[in-house]
Amino acid sequence: MDATVTLADQLREDTHGPVVLVNTFVVPPEDADALLNAWSRDAAIMKRQPGFISTQLHRGTAGSGTFLNYAVWQSAAHFREAFANPEFRAQLGAYPDSATATPHLFRRVEVPGICVA
């Protein structure tokens, strides 16, 4: 999502506090069911990991093959440990070859009068 900051860069960060993983997946519409099956299996693994708070998958409308996953973790360190889990890593091969993923970690930002961090 940010060409100047990779997920690997973000996984090295050791600051504390919640982070949000936003991950977009793009597949041809005919591979959407395979993506959903793979995502469901890896989400079940992540849900069992320490520091996991929640996740939600969204799909673009009108038959779009674009999906957006929004997951909340207690910290970047928790997500890093979960991402390195061998069971999760092995599951990544279940995604369709046509799938592209673009993961990125975020922190909430306070904007006075609009939202709190």
Image: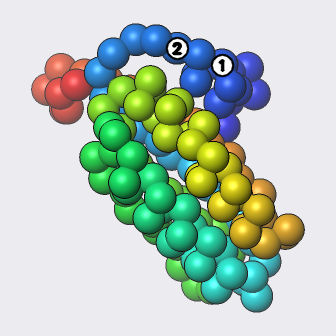
In the picture of the structure, the residue carrying the numbered disc 1 is: 9
- The x, y position of residue 13, in whole percent, is 52, 14
Name which residue type carries label 1.
Answer: Asp
The quarter of the picture where the C terminus appears is: top left
Q: Is residue 117 above or below residue 63?
A: above
Residue occupying image coordinates x 44% and y 26% = 76
**Residue 59 bears which disc, if any?**
none
* Relative image position of residue 64 (x, y in whole percent): 64, 77
Observer-nearest residue: 1 or 11?
11
Do the numbered discs 2 and 1 sit on residues whose CB atoms are within 8 Å?
A: yes
Quadrant in the rendering for residue 84: top right
Residue depicted at x 58% and y 84%:
62
| Residue of label 2 | 13
User: In the picture provided, is 109 more to the left or to the right than 88?
Assistant: left
Mark 2 neighbour class, 10 Å CA radius: few under 14, some 14 to 19, many 20 or more: few
Residue 111 visible to the viewer: no
Please tell me in which quadrant of the rendered image residue 3 appears: top right
Report the side of 35 relative to 79 (left or right): right
SS label for mark 2:
loop
Question: In the rendered view, would you say 99 is above or below 83?
Answer: below
- Which residue of the protein is positioned furthest toward the left in this rendering? 113
Answer above or below: position of 93 versus 101.
Answer: below
Quadrant including the N terminus: top right
Residue 20 pos. (x, y %): 40, 38
| SS at mark 1 in the image | helix
| Residue that sits furthest to the front in the current view | 86
Left or right for 76, reference 26 = left
Q: Residue at x 30, y 32 (%)?
A: 74
Going by the numbered disc 2, the residue's amino acid type is Glu
